[in-house]
Image: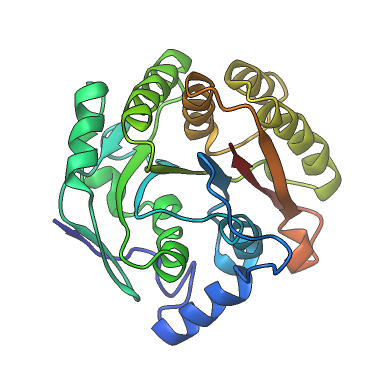
Amino acid sequence: MLRLPAVAGRFYPANPEELTALVRKYAMPQPDTPPQRVKACLVPHAGLVFSGHVAGAVLSRIALPQRIVILGVRHFPRGESLAINTSGAWRTPLGDVPIDETLAAALMKECSMLREDRVAHGAEHSLEVQLPFLQVLSPGFSFVPIALGTARFDDLVAVGEALARVLAAHPEVFLLTTSDLNHYENDATTRVKDKKAIDQILALNPRGLYDVCRNEDISMCGLGPAVAMLTALRALAANRAELVRYATSADVSGDTSSVVGYAGFIFS
């Protein structure tokens, strides 16, 4: 299966040269911070003009390997709620990225709830917008896309535990998880709410993150992927989380009346 780009020209430039230049602008390496090997990261997935500087700040800090699991959210109510692609490739303006079939098979074996599904991935942007960054920063990589459309805590824990088993057996594999934070409230309210979610992420606390988002009405779209990631990291004995950058869409648009929050983390 060849999955064609769904949001090129909208969430990021469709012109390859323009796209490459934008990625390099946002992911400019810092001379005093050499790339490091880490277990996972959490980055946003809005249009690059709004959140690309946050994602780029994170990914420029990481020595990215050649095998990557991208764990995103299913925004639209179509397709399987635990959707994976196990073969083929995804296309962006920068070329085709192959699915890591061996890694996908291992994930399917460990997590029987995952279902092969093209529909859930067909129009989903959360995973797609990560690919240009990775194509520029880690040329030749392969990946496995997983989109979660469930908010059932027990299901998310099961996915996270399965991820941990696979990552423990394949320590060269990197886990990239994507979520935006609070949506469409004013900037001041969003920053207060986002800090509550950020504190739980920094504490590597999946249950705490799930509960605070539910109890405080924090509209974190990738809550499911983040809970699964934190569950995996705990099982892998990760003990360090770092907030690399935080922003809201108001930092770009200037409109503080209705914003989306973005945060980027690395985990080791």
Q: How many marks?
A: 0
Q: How is the image coloured?
A: rainbow
Extreme right residue here? 188
Q: Does 258 appear above or below 223?
A: below
Q: Position of residue 175 (x, y in %)?
A: 44, 41
Q: Is residue 202 found left or right of 1 in the rendered image?
A: right
In-front residue for pair 21/212: 21
Q: Does 50 appear above or below 186?
A: below
Q: Is residue 44 found left or right of 123 in the rendered image?
A: right
Residue 15 appears in view: no
Q: Is residue 108 found left or right of 148 in the rendered image?
A: left
Extreme top residue here? 154
In-front residue for pair 119/99: 99
Q: Quadrant of the C terminus?
A: top right
Q: Does 158 appear above or below 62?
A: above
At a point 28% along the width and 53% down the height, the residue shown is 122
Q: Quadrant of the N terminus?
A: bottom left
In-front residue for pair 32/232: 32
At a point 30% along the width and 40% down the height, the residue shown is 78
Q: Position of residue 155 (x, y in %)?
A: 39, 18
At a point 36% along the width and 40% down the height, the residue shown is 147
At a point 63% along the width and 68% down the height, the residue shown is 29
Q: Quadrant of residue 197?
A: top right
Q: Position of residue 187 (x, y in %)?
A: 81, 49
Q: Position of residue 225 (x, y in %)?
A: 47, 34
Q: Quadrant of residue 211?
A: top right
Residue 40 appears in view: yes
